[in-house]
Amino acid sequence: MLSTDQAQSVSARIAQRVKRLPKGQPFSIRRFTGLGTKNAVSKAIARLVNRGELERVYRGIYMRPKPGRYVARARPNPWKLLSLITRQKRLSLQIHGANAVRRFGLSTQMPLIPIYYTNGASRSVFIGKAEVRLIHAAPMVMQHAGTEAGMAISALFYLGKEGATPECTAAIKKALRPDDLIKLMTSKIPKWMRIALDC
């Protein structure tokens, strides 16, 4: 059991560290492991939330509130938030194929609900009232998760054998840095994808 002085010093140290964190960037409560007992850290975080200095964005994940341009408070970047959530569960996160082809300039379509691939179970995550979907993907799709090479793999699987035209593969290869292109070409990919990339 912590004394009142010890509890106050845990709160003070956490409050000081929180002030140095960038606004709008989600972080895990685990960041403060070692500053006090789990209970003391949780209480200190709860006090900061009550004072409006922190916002709870997901279970065990918080951020310093950041005023939005058009809304009272900006929402956290979904990729950064989901990366934190999946990392806590020791899972990987990969950009969805529909978003990947859009990033490469091959499509302008935007899914109504943000979707990402994971090597964990498929499920929906709610950030406030907004839904984000995590879809289980095969290990081949999850290669180089979170990198440009991974985004290229995701895009190519989404395009499929018929959609991976010479124009599309050329655009993907052109957008990659040399080291990412090497990563892509040395990945474990199906024969049709290898042929499409070698064109």
Image (cartoon, rainbow, N blue to C red):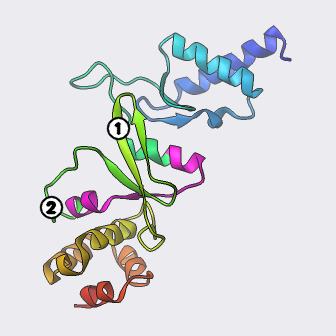
* Magenta region: 84-102
Q: Residue at x 15, y 61 (%)?
A: 107
Q: Are marks 2 and 1 in contact (CB under 8 Å)?
A: no
* 62 left or right of 127 in image: right
Per the rendering, the mark at residue 78 is none
Q: Which mark is residue 107?
A: 2
Between marks 2 and 1, how big is the CA–CA gap? Answer: 23 Å
Nearer to me, 124 or 102: 124
Q: Badge 1: how crowded within 10 Å, few (<14), some, or many (20+)?
A: some
Q: Position of residue 31 (x, y in %)?
A: 63, 36
Picture quadrant where residue 78 is located:
top left
Task: Return the disc, 2 or 1, that comes first in the chain's sequence.
Answer: 2
> What amino acid does circle 1 point to?
Glu
Q: Kindly identify the amino acid type of the residue bearing the numbered disc 2.
A: Ser
- Residue 97 to residue 10: above or below: below
What is the crowding at mark 2: few (fewer than 14 residues within 10 Å), some, or many (at least 20)?
A: few
Which secondary structure, mark 1? strand
Q: In the picture shown, does residue 34 fall above or below 40?
A: below
Say how many tags the image has: 2
**Which numbered marker is on residue 131?**
1
Tell me the residue at 15%/54% (across/down). 109
